[in-house]
Image (cartoon, rainbow, N blue to C red):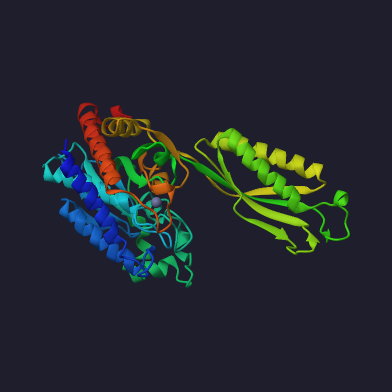
């Protein structure tokens, strides 16, 4: 294994490269790099240079993902896929996604430096669009690679009414060739992604890195409480059907049930009608976002919330209705790949920690092709999708060490047992 000095150098290089990529932005004072933009092309070119230096061949696929390959002991062998995304939200931090791509490149760089070829190839991918910032639909890059791209997405417009099809052409890609980005399940033996946690748990546990057990599934509901609007001065308190007071009780009940049942549930939008200072609210519409690593548990808790909401409404002579407008299922991380990461974490930082991911990631799409795993890195105060997102060079070095060691162990197991015995 590497001595500390070299590991430190690698962490510092990943950190410095994150700063450098932050310059590829549509405005000079904020980091915003969206799908199929000029900055996306510039970023791909820069990262491709680093991939070349690490001994990889590179190409840009039909949806704009930047791909690279480091051959194994025999050329054309199936690959372990490493990577994350290179796009950002508006006014973003410098590490979300990017740190994972750069860490993967350093793993290959070290193999090249030591002249090591593994029993499988390594491919590194910088996904073109994970955040959905420009066209409102997330995971476009990874869904292109896994063949889940929907033809109607080509007509999705951005804020300037430029469609994905038009943007692809401006970028130098052909909309009719999107399907060429699709890779086969036979191409890959697994996918490992390093990503910042975007939450506070690792910092609380005083750990640089932790292993993701599952990416939470989510359901988003629209809920409505209807009562009777009335004059704020003339209707006595005991004769009111105040929709907002009922909705408030439901919101508090959602918080209580979520805490008891260990899911996360958020009411993020609430609209009060008629929204007037001297009128008793007649109707309230609000959203509910509920997430868990266990879909069945999430659905049971949601059913409990709906039942309680109905009881509250009946008690207050209100009407309650709800419907689901978005659903994604949880993605389990592969137990063998998790073990590799956990063992490496224990070796490098003394102990490991398993946590579920509250946010969505490219690994959700890649799980359709092959087993996936994720390593989370501590970020200051759990802040992400914000310019104050911060990761230390030291933690990046630990993340690199964990990934490098896991890849080495995977190779050792693979040599002994082949891919099937590993899982
Ligand atoms: Zn991300």
Residue closest to the eye, 149 or 237: 237
What's the residue at 21%, 35% (across, down)? 408
| Residue 75 visible (yes or no) | no
Spot the residue most to the bottom: 160
Which quarter shows the N terminus?
Answer: top left
Numbered disc total: 0
* Res. 343 image quadrant: top left
Residue 158 vs residue 421: left or right? Answer: right
315 over 418 or under it: above or below: below
* Res. 40 image quadrant: bottom left
* Res. 364 image quadrant: top left
Where residue 283 sits in the image (x, y, percent)?
75, 56
Residue closest to the eye, 339 or 274: 274
What's the residue at 34%, 49% (across, down)? 391
Residue 6 vs residue 315: left or right? Answer: left
281 over 168 or under it: above or below: above
Where residue 187 sits in the image (x, y, percent)?
28, 43
Where residue 120 sits in the image (x, y, percent)?
21, 39
Residue closest to the eye, 197 or 321: 197
Which quarter shows the C terminus?
Answer: top left
Residue 379 vs residue 395: left or right? Answer: right
Residue 180 vs residue 326: left or right? Answer: left
Where residue 250 sits in the image (x, y, percent)?
70, 45
| Residue 25 visible (yes or no) | yes
């Amino acid at each position: 294994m590497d001595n500390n000095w070299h590991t430190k150098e690698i962490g510092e290089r990943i950190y410095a490269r994150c700063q450098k990529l932050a310059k590829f932005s549509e405005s000079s004072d904020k980091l915003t790099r969206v799908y199929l933009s000029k900055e996306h092309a510039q970023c791909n070119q820069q990262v491709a240079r680093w991939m070349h230096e690490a001994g990889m061949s590179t190409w840009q696929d039909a949806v704009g993902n930047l791909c690279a390959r480091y051959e194994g002991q025999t050329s054309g062998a199936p690959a372990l896929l490493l990577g994350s995304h290179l796009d950002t939200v508006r006014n973003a931090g410098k590490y979300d996604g990017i740190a994972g791509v750069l860490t993967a490149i350093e793993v290959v760089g070290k193999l090249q430096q030591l002249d090591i070829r593994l029993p499988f190839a390594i491919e590194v991918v910088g996904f073109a669009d994970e955040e959905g910032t420009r066209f409102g639909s997330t995971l476009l890059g990874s869904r292109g690679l896994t063949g889940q791209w929907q033809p109607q997405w080509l007509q999705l417009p951005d804020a300037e009414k430029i469609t994905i099809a038009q943007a692809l052409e401006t970028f130098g890609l052909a909309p009719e060739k999107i399907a060429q980005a699709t890779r086969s399940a036979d191409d890959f033996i697994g996918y490992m992604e390093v990503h910042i946690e975007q939450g506070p748990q690792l910092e609380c546990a005083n750990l640089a890195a932790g292993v993701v057990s599952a990416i939470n599934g989510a359901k988003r509901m629209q809920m409505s409480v209807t009562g009777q609007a009335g004059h704020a001065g003339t209707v006595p308190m005991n004769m009111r059907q105040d929709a907002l007071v009922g909705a408030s009780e439901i919101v508090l009940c959602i918080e209580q049930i979520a805490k008891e049942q260990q899911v996360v549930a958020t009411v993020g939008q609430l609209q009060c009608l008629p929204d007037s200072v001297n009128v008793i609210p007649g109707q309230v519409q609000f959203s509910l976002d509920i997430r868990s690593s266990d879909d069945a548990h999430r659905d049971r808790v949601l059913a409990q919330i709906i039942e309680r909401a109905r009881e509250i409404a009946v008690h207050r002579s209100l009407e309650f209705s709800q419907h689901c407008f978005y659903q994604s299922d949880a993605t389990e991380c592969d137990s063998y790949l998790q073990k590799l990461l956990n063992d490496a974490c224990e070796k490098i930082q003394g102990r490991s920690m398993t946590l579920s991911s509250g946010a969505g990631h490219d690994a959700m799409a890649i799980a359709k092709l092959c087993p996936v795993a994720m390593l989370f890195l501590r970020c200051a105060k759990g802040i992400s999708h914000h310019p104050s997102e911060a990761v230390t060079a030291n933690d990046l070095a630990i993340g690199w060490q964990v990934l490098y060691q896991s890849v080495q162990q995977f190779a050792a197991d693979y040599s002994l047992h082949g891919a099937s015995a590993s899982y």
